[in-house]
């Protein structure tokens, strides 16, 4: 009778149905994972595809004659005056010297447009400002080409496009090719991207101030959010009486984690800027706003980490005569440590990607200096990406993608560190 | 134990950084900065500029050149013209911006608010022109439309005829419905959202200018300016006009992919993308640099910035920054701002602006 039950036609049918359900579920699961992977690959391919070329750039190595008559006709060597001197003239003459046959004014302008006007003049300016004794000498300096020439050699400006439809004229292409043959123009690693602050000229723009700003914001946010988040979680979980009021607080913390981040920006604007009168666009305020954003995440992660620790450990400690505080801090907290740290790092990674709250407190800004303290104006990496993506020149597209690559690398490093830390601490147990 | 030590270590190290960074840094920073001698008599953290996103590229370029020449830091924020005036007029103390950029003239209400908050001396500086273009993909049919065509294409409600101002929901579906000489493509325009200064200018110059060409609306304007403004400023909401967000690069890509669509944006984006898109002629005039400079292209606006005179003594380099902005090297013909799409003022006007900056003479509404 019982044997018959397992081989009866109904049972076989049921079995088939159950296997069918399992098979379909697996298929759905594989399809879901496949879709997620495809989306990720598509994202990476499109970003790396446009962004990788920004890590190299074309440079010109030229001998600039720092003539005294142009830069310092009085011979006074006054540092401030030297800063404002006419370096453009020197760059122009150096480039004209490459093509002595060009005499017409319009053509000369086009020759000059091959080099990064702002970059070359400023490089010479800072050199002379640092060391006025260079005046009168001839110096060999490597300066960036203009973004148009760079885009031409990278193939983003197509040579086959009709001349009136592209920003580089036929003769400019010929001159650029000649300079490349002469070895004046060379492709190099784009160090500028990592060492310069933001610039209006794509060939001079870098993410140094944005990265530093992001780091400062994260440090401030971590310092504020970590103790508050962990502390409130421990108190709520271990010491607070269980009543309506603590339930209410718990509900609110969970809600806070889901509040759109722009709301925290508005709060920061109202409290930190308008009420407390702190300056706009500084990483200190940015960090404070993001701390508000991150601390609920840390609290929730800490609480779930604490709750996953076996109660027998605390019971054991208590039965051996430990006080409640000792049991929590000496036994429970260390075991919950990996979970707390992982949760916090993931919270910080979220904070790294935030732009909306920073918009409200004035960190969507063009800053000409790499900040040296948390009270100086700075910007953040995602904000930099946002600002670049909206600029007109073609060369910004690859730089935007390059900045996104850097952001992704930082995020992967942070998450990788979280995983490494968890594995390491778990092994030690 | 060791794990606890690690957690405590991380926390305390972080706290130390906080103390070091949070409290000590600003106080340490101030003397070291002054000692650097980069900014003579620098009492503030640099020049603060807020305002229009249209002026932002020009302002940042000048900021960069100025920083290179003087070592004085300039922070430029893109807040939109309206947001800029609001911040600028919020008071005269050191925490408020020194300069606000604007893609339109300061409104009377904004000026009054400024005065009410103690910002009574403002120097107005006009820096140049910017055209607003209607563009489509380079391989699509060229368009030559009048301002009235623009109005009839995009207004939510249009008059039944030139003489009968009974308003009806805009019945025009294709460009040829409005003007037989235009292509028979369906009307589909991607333009800036209401938060944008470009949208304000488009509505005020192109739409209002077009509405004025309809005789009965022109007479309505004489009787009831407000009603006229409402009619002229309301864009259609039946999907023919699409708010495309602030990213003009994405807009250019959309136009390339949709050959029948038209996009509305600032002249500098047309200038940078001449291999992908072309501008429509308005009233027979090409949106070209020369035409905007000469004032022939009808949909052009002036760009401004406003200086808080009270900050001249407290913000080092403020006047010098304004002088750099108005120098021939920057805003003149062939200057570095022209290279990135600013249309310079005529010589006489530029000289007048320059004189106002040199004497720092405040303006009145």
Image (tube, helix red, strand yellow):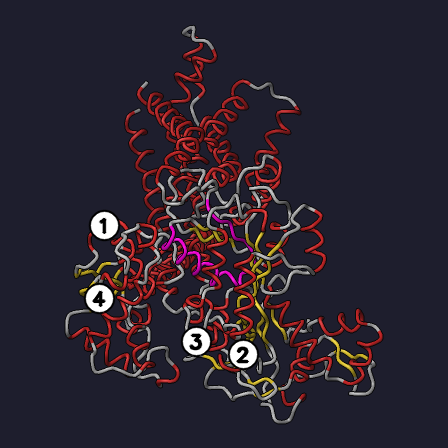
Q: Nearer the viewer, residue B151 or A241?
A: B151
> A294 above or below B316?
above
- Do marks 4 and 1 both belong to one polypeptide chain? yes
Quote the CA–CA distance across marks 2 and 1. 45 Å
- Check if mark 2 and mark 1 are on a common chain: no
Near mark 4 (Cα within 10 A), the count class, few <14, some 14-19 or many ≥20, is many
- State whether residue B250 is above or below residue A228: below
Mark 3 or mark 4, which is nearer to you? Answer: 4
| Image disc number at residue B273 | 3
> In this image, B263 relative to A409: left or right?
right
Q: Indicate the chain on which mark 2 is placed.
A: B
Which region is colored magenta?
Answer: B46-70
Instruction: Provide the chain ID for the residue under circle 1.
Output: A
Q: Residue furthest top?
A: A321
Nearer-the-camera pick, A305 or B192: B192
State the mark number for residue B292.
Answer: 2
Identify residue for label 1.
A131
């Amino acid at each position: 009778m019982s044997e018959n039950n397992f081989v009866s036609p109904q049972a076989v049918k049921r079995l088939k149905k159950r296997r069918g359900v399992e098979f379909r579920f697996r298929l759905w699961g594989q399809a879901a994972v496949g879709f997620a992977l495809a989306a990720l690959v598509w994202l990476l391919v499109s970003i790396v595809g446009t962004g990788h070329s920004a890590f190299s750039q074309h440079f010109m190595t030229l001998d600039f004659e720092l003539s005294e008559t142009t830069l310092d006709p009085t011979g006074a060597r006054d540092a401030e005056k030297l800063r404002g001197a006419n370096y453009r003239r020197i760059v122009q003459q150096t480039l004209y010297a490459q093509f002595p046959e060009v005499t017409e004014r319009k053509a000369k302008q086009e020759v000059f447009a091959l080099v990064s006007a702002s970059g070359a003049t400023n490089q010479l300016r800072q050199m002379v400002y640092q060391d006025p004794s260079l005046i009168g000498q001839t110096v060999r300096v490597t300066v960036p080409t203009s973004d148009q020439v760079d885009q031409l050699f990278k193939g983003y400006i197509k040579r086959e496009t009709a001349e009136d439809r592209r920003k580089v004229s036929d003769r400019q292409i010929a001159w650029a090719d000649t300079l490349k043959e002469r070895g004046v123009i060379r492709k190099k690693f784009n160090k500028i991207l990592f060492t310069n602050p933001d610039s209006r000229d794509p060939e001079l723009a870098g993410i140094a101030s944005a990265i530093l700003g992001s780091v400062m914001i994260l440090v401030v946010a971590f310092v504020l959010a970590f103790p508050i988040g962990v502390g409130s979680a421990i108190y709520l979980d271990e010491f607070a009486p269980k009543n309506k009021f603590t339930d209410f607080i718990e509900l609110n913390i969970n809600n806070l984690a889901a509040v759109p981040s722009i709301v925290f920006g508005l709060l920061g604007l109202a409290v930190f800027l308008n009420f407390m009168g702190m300056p706009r666009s500084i990483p200190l305020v940015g960090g404070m706003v993001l701390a508000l954003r991150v601390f609920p995440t840390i609290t929730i992660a800490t609480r779930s980490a604490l709750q996953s620790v076996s109660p027998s450990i605390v019971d054991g400690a208590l039965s051996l005569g430990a006080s409640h505080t000792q049991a929590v801090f000496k036994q429970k907290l260390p075991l919950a440590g990996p979970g707390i740290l992982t949760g916090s790092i993931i919270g910080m990674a979220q904070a790294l990607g935030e732009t909306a709250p920073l918009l409200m407190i004035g960190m969507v800004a063009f800053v000409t200096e790499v900040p040296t303290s948390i009270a100086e104006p700075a910007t953040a990496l995602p904000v930099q990406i946002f600002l670049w993506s909206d600029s007109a020149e073609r060369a910004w597209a690859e730089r935007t993608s390059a900045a996104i690559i850097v952001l992704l690398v930082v995020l992967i490093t942070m998450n990788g560190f979280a995983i490494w830390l968890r594995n390491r601490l778990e092994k030690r147990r | 134990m060791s794990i606890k030590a690690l957690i405590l270590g991380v926390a305390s190290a972080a706290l130390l950084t906080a103390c070091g960074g949070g409290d000590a840094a600003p106080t340490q920073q101030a003397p070291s900065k002054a000692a650097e001698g980069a900014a003579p008599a620098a009492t503030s953290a640099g020049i603060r500029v807020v305002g229009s996103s249209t002026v932002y590229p020009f302002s940042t370029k000048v900021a960069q050149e100025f920083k290179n020449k003087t070592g004085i830091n300039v922070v430029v924020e893109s807040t939109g013209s309206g947001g800029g005036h609001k911040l600028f007029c919020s008071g005269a103390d050191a925490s408020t911006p020194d300069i606000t950029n604007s893609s339109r003239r300061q409104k009377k209400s904004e000026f009054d608010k400024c005065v009410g908050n103690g910002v009574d001396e403002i120097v107005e500086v006009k820096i140049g022109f910017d055209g607003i273009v209607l563009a489509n993909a380079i391989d699509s049919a060229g368009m030559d439309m009048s301002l009235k065509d623009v109005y009839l294409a995009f207004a939510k409600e249009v008059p039944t005829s030139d003489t009968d101002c009974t308003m009806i929901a805009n019945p025009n579906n294709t460009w040829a419905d409005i003007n037989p000489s235009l292509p028979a493509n369906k009307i589909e325009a991607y333009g800036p959202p209401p938060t944008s200064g470009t949208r304000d200018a488009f509505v005020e110059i192109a739409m209002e200018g077009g509405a004025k060409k309809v005789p009965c609306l022109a007479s309505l304007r004489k009787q009831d300016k407000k009603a006229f403004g409402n009619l002229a400023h309301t864009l259609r909401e039946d999907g023919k006009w699409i708010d495309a967000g602030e990213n003009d690069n994405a807009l250019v890509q959309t136009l390339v992919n949709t050959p029948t669509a038209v996009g509305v944006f600032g002249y500098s984006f047309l200038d940078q993308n001449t291999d992908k898109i072309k501008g429509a002629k308005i009233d027979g005039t090409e949106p070209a640099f020369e035409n905007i400079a000469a004032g022939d292209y009808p949909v052009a606006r002036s760009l401004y910035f406003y200086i808080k005179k009270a900050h001249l003594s407290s913000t080092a380099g403020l006047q010098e920054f304004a002088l750099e902005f108005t120098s021939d090297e920057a805003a003149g013909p062939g200057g570095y701002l022209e290279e990135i799409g600013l249309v310079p003022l005529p010589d006489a006007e530029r000289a007048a602006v320059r004189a106002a900056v040199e004497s720092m003479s405040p303006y009145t509404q």
